[in-house]
Image (spheres, rainbow, N blue to C red):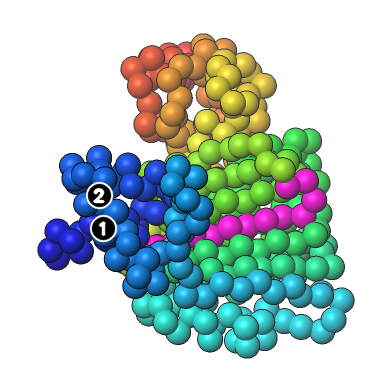
């Protein structure tokens, strides 16, 4: 790939995250003048791959979509996820690579079925957006909200804890009919997933293997946003193998999800909120990514309550710094 193509490819791949400063980002990346970068941008505009909006300082850019449409579905009328997928969605995905088509077919069907079966909704709205570099699928319903549904079904007493349970994986409100595996696999098939409901936004970023929780304006229903690059080499086979080759009775718990903004992790209540539904788990792995400090009370309660709820569990922790290691090791030593 020559330098001109590299610059244009960089612009296309990074434009979604830099709509207002993609020119500056490109200058920093390649060390070229503003005029030189603008020349490549104008080429992309002329090729109808990028759209420019506004003038001079207020100008911003967007990828020109290949597919961009929304559809509303009345669930009071007879329909099925299969029918929606076959007639409305899959025909628009024939332009993407085989592995991406496979991921989208599996995932879009899974979240449509889940919404129809469990959301207690009367209406669904979805958006499909395909650009030369990205695919976005957004599903919105007017139901109870996924976090509130889990909160009620699992008696969690806190909708934010429901977000933690989703991050753990293998979670379901209907264990007699569903394993809880589908949502977990969908989440790991995409580059980025955002789930908004009950004023909470749960975000998973695949590249960093990182979970985060933020405030959300979505109060009613659930909004799920799936995002993947069109050149992703990810496949259903690889992701399923990564997930299911592991011991089934193992759970990884992202500790940072219990924090409100940047509050400290030092209370026993915080520790307790991580430990729902762990009784039959043989290995429990606490992920301390983005946690710089924990308190001794938190570490003690985390280990103590884990052992009380599941005395046979093998407790491990990852992505921890020295002080976290010291406090977790101390708590383990005191209780073993």
Left or right, residue 57 beside residue 166 = left
Q: Which secondary structure, mark 1?
A: helix
Q: Position of residue 244 (x, y in %)?
A: 43, 60
User: Does the segment drawn in magenta span residue 227?
Assistant: yes
Residue closer to the observer: 303 or 182: 182
| Residue 107 visible in image | no
Q: Are marks 2 and 1 in contact (CB under 8 Å)?
A: yes
* Range shown magenta: 218-230
Report, in whole angstroms, how far the alpha carbon at label 2 lies from the one at label 1: 6 Å
User: Does the segment drawn in magenta span residue 123?
Assistant: no
Which residue is the extreme one toward the front? 56
Q: Main secondary structure of the magenta part?
A: strand
Q: Position of residue 277 (x, y in %)?
A: 64, 42
Marker count (numbered) = 2
Classify 75 as above or below 313: below
Q: Position of residue 69 (x, y in %)?
A: 61, 73
Residue closer to the observer: 84 or 3: 3
Q: Residue at x 81, y 74 (%)?
A: 75
Q: Which secondary structure, mark 2?
A: helix
Residue closer to the observer: 137 or 157: 137
Q: Residues within 10 Å of mark 1 (few under 14, many from 20)?
A: few
Q: Which residue is mark 2?
A: 35
Q: Picture quarter containing residue 73?
A: bottom right
Q: Residue at x 49, y 17 (%)?
A: 294
Which residue is the extreme one toward the left? 2
Q: Which mark, residue 39? A: 1
Q: Position of residue 20 (x, y in %)?
A: 45, 46
């Amino acid at each position: 790939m020559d330098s001109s193509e590299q610059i244009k490819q960089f612009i296309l791949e990074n434009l979604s995250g830099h709509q207002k400063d993609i020119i500056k980002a490109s200058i920093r990346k390649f060390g070229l003048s503003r005029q030189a970068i603008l020349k490549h941008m104008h080429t992309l505009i002329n090729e109808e791959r990028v759209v420019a909006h506004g003038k001079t300082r207020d100008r911003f850019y967007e990828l020109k979509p290949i597919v961009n449409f929304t559809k509303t579905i009345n669930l009071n009328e007879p329909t099925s996820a299969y029918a929606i997928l076959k007639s409305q969605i899959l025909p628009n995905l024939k332009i993407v690579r085989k592995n991406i088509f496979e991921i989208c077919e599996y995932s879009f069907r899974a979240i449509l079925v889940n919404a129809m079966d469990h959301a207690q909704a009367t209406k669904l709205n979805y958006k499909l957006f395909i650009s030369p570099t990205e695919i976005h699928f957004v599903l919105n319903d007017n139901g109870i909200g996924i976090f509130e549904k889990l909160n009620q079904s699992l008696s969690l007493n806190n909708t934010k804890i429901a977000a933690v349970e989703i991050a753990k994986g293998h979670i379901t409100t209907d264990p007699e009919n569903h394993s809880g595996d589908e949502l977990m696999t969908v989440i790991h098939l995409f580059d980025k997933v955002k789930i908004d409901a009950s004023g909470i936004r749960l975000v998973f970023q695949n590249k960093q293997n990182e979970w985060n929780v933020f405030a959300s304006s979505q109060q009613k229903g659930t909004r799920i946003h799936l995002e993947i690059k069109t050149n992703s080499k990810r496949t259903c086979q690889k992701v399923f193998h990564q997930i299911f080759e592991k011991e089934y009775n193992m759970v990884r718990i992202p500790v940072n999800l219990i924090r409100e903004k940047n509050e400290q992790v030092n209370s026993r209540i915080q520790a307790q909120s991580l430990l729902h539904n762990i009784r039959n788990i043989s290995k429990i792995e606490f992920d301390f990514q983005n946690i710089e400090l924990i308190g001794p009370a938190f570490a003690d309660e985390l280990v103590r309550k884990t052992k009380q709820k599941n005395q046979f569990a093998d407790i491990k922790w990852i992505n921890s710094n020295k002080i976290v290691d010291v406090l977790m090791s101390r708590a383990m030593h005191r209780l073993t």
